[in-house]
Amino acid sequence: MTDRSAWTIAVGRWWFRYRNALFPVVFVLVPLLTRPRVLFGDPRLDRLASGAGVAIALLGEAVRLLTIGFDYVERGGKNKQVAASRLVEGGIYAHTRKPMHLGNLLIAVGMSMVSGAPAAYLIVIPLFAFIYHAIISAEEAFLHHAFGAGYVAYCSRVPRLLPSLRGFRRTLAGAEYHWRRAIRKDLSTITGLLLGLICLPVWRVLCLDGSQAALARAPRTIGLVAAVLALYSALHALKKRRLFFYVPTHLPPDMPGGLR
């Protein structure tokens, strides 16, 4: 192991501890510290880029939901450290070794495009790429040590990040999808993404067209935000009471111990 790789792994272990706060902190700071611009001064191109950003961000969330729903992965590590009790190879993990990170990166790219702020392109996307490179390095070092030849064989079959679609239809057809578990586990991420997609366009209007134009959108925006928060509150209450989102006991227990 080179000094550089050892340093990257150390950085990845540090970021692993705080990765759950990464999205909220960055996407609160982006509106506060940056200003959007019309892409190349062309409103049509700007709208196209913003629409593409929405699609990319939603694709990222779809990747996360597919990953969680198809093959259970013990998420969150143990005591904020990289950990895993088993090597997950099924579901989406049969096509990419890091599907959750792929989903997160897609969300980061998509939300940066929706913001339309040059600083988001220049800072947020490279920052996320570096952070996840470091986290992946830390996770791979752990998995190689924990699972040895089994993990090496898995790496030889499955790409690290960009997925292979070979056999993907068979994966979808041959596995049970636990949609309740997917929503339960990713409820906060879904809510944050929806709130971002609702509020960022208003921030763009405020910066580009002024307060009057932003105020004209306020009733609709407030209504959408209230609806999302109400839905989150209802689902969160069901989650806490283990209603609707109950996971049958034959599934692996919901406990810390894995990678995402």
Image (cartoon, rainbow, N blue to C red):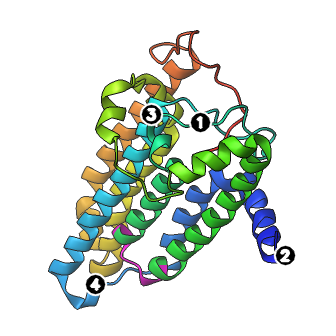
Is 177 or 144 nearer to us in this picture? 144
Residue where numbered disc 3 is placed: 232
Image location (x, y in percent) of residue 203: 37, 68
- Within-10-Å neighbours for mark 4: few <14, some 14–19, many 20+: some
Q: Residue at x 26, y 65 (%)?
A: 52
Name the residue that disc number 2 marks: 3
Question: Is 44 situated above or below 228?
Answer: below
Discs 2/3, front: 2
The answer to whether residue 49 is visible is yes
The mark found on residue 88 in the picture is: 1
Look at label 1 and name its amino acid: Val
Distance Cα–Cα, label 2 vs label 4:
41 Å
Q: Amino acid at mark 4?
A: Leu
Figure quadrant of the N terminus: bottom right
What is the span of residues highlighted in magenta in the rendered image? Answer: 114-119
- Given residues 247 and 66, the one toward you in this image is 66
Residue at label 4?
A: 39
Magenta span: helix, strand or loop, mainly? helix
